[in-house]
Image (spheres, rainbow, N blue to C red):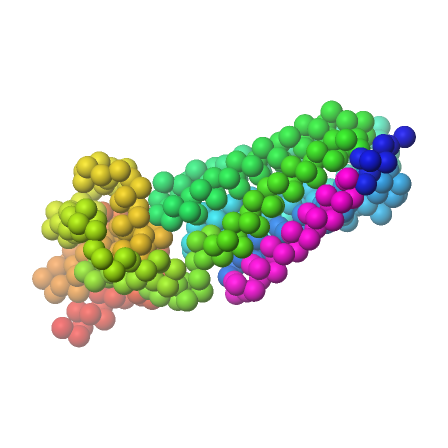
Amino acid sequence: MTDPVITVLDATLRGMLLALLALLAAALWRDRPALAAARVAVALCLGLCVQVISSMPLIEASLPLLWQAPWIAISVANAVVFWVFVQALFDDDFALKPLHVAAWGAVATLSVVHCIALAHPLSPLALVTLGLQRSVPLVFAVLAMVAAAAHWRDDLVESRRRVRAFIVVAGVIYTLAMLMARMASAHGRLSATTALVDTAALGVIVAVMAWWLLRVGSTDLFPSAQRLAISAPSAAAPQRVPDAPVAPSVPDPAEERLAAALQRAMQHERVYRGEDLSVASLASRLTVPEYRLRRLINQRLGFRNFNAYVNSFRLDDARAALADPARRELPVLTIALDAGFQSIGPFNRAFKAATGLTPTEFRRENIADS
């Protein structure tokens, strides 16, 4: 017999959590309706709403399993949406790909098949689908951590770095903890007490995220649509993007010295041509803490990502070489490597994104006009 106090408390927490998720989804949809990353965040909020409702002990215990199958499928596939959400958090140029949709569909289908197979729990199919379904949260939690680590050091927005760390760490811990709880329980169902802990833990994560968004807005988390429409700023004359905070009216002497040192390093010493240039190595060269360099490049120069900042110099360098008639015979690969790119693939993609032309097309047009 379930303790009525736990039942009432569980229902109350679930109601509050559903309200918070709805608030988050509405805020993101209002601020970023056309942005793919915000759409993924909204999808995650809605998927979690389904999970909160379908994981109620009363529903799990009384509703026929086949009726629960669609709800369970969405809940299990939330692991995929979380993985995609983390990618969106760490990539300002994120775009939803067919692979993401295919992964969600495959996991949801696996979950439905597992529910059907449980009608014959001793069949080999049920054992196989059980193992696969239980591996899904673990696999996508690992993928989320890999996605988070891939671009962590390049992020220049300090507030976004902090909230990203919280979302990823809390999300991964929550996913793995609930997986272990269901594996340890009979028939994969949570007890009333464990379900209450599940709801409370998820509620804390969502509440922190909602507080952060309502306090500072979603600008720091996701770039604005207007910012995405602006091409990479020129290295010679950096432009402020709409998301960058306004610089103080009274210049800070220390910041002015750092800005001058950074300009010398990039424009005159051309350190951007070096291999493996990072925020850490550049900060060490300038003998300043990393956070000060990040703040300068983000708030003063308007860049949100260190690679975008460095590539703006490299692309200017490459454009000048490609437009120079004296270097018309120089291979594009050589120009890319001289500018600091490590291979031709990333150079071609970055060049096409910045100019709308391939390097060969750009050279042909500019040399023909000279």
Residue at 30 percent of width and 48 percent of height: 295
Spot the residue most to the top.
184
81 sits to left or right of 93: right
Instruction: Mark yes or no: residue 337 visible.
Output: no
In the rendered image, which quarter is residue 135 located in? top right
**Can you say whether 97 is above or below 184 in the image?**
below
Residue at 18 percent of width and 73 percent of height: 368
Q: Nearer the viewer, residue 244 or 338?
A: 244
**Can you say whether 135 is above or below 304 in the image?**
above
Spot the residue most to the left.
326
Instruction: Give the position of the C terminus as an image quadrant.
Output: bottom left
Q: Does the segment drawn in magenta span residue 15?
A: yes
Instruction: Give the position of the N terminus as an image quadrant.
Output: top right
- The x and y percentages for residue 101 are 60, 52
Range shown magenta: 9-34
Residue at 56 percent of width and 64 percent of height: 30
93 sits to left or right of 309: right
Q: Main secondary structure of the magenta part?
A: helix
Q: Does the segment drawn in magenta span residue 267?
A: no
Spot the residue most to the front.
250
100 sits to left or right of 351: right
- The x and y percentages for residue 36 are 52, 59
- The x and y percentages for residue 360 are 26, 62
- The x and y percentages for residue 266 are 18, 50
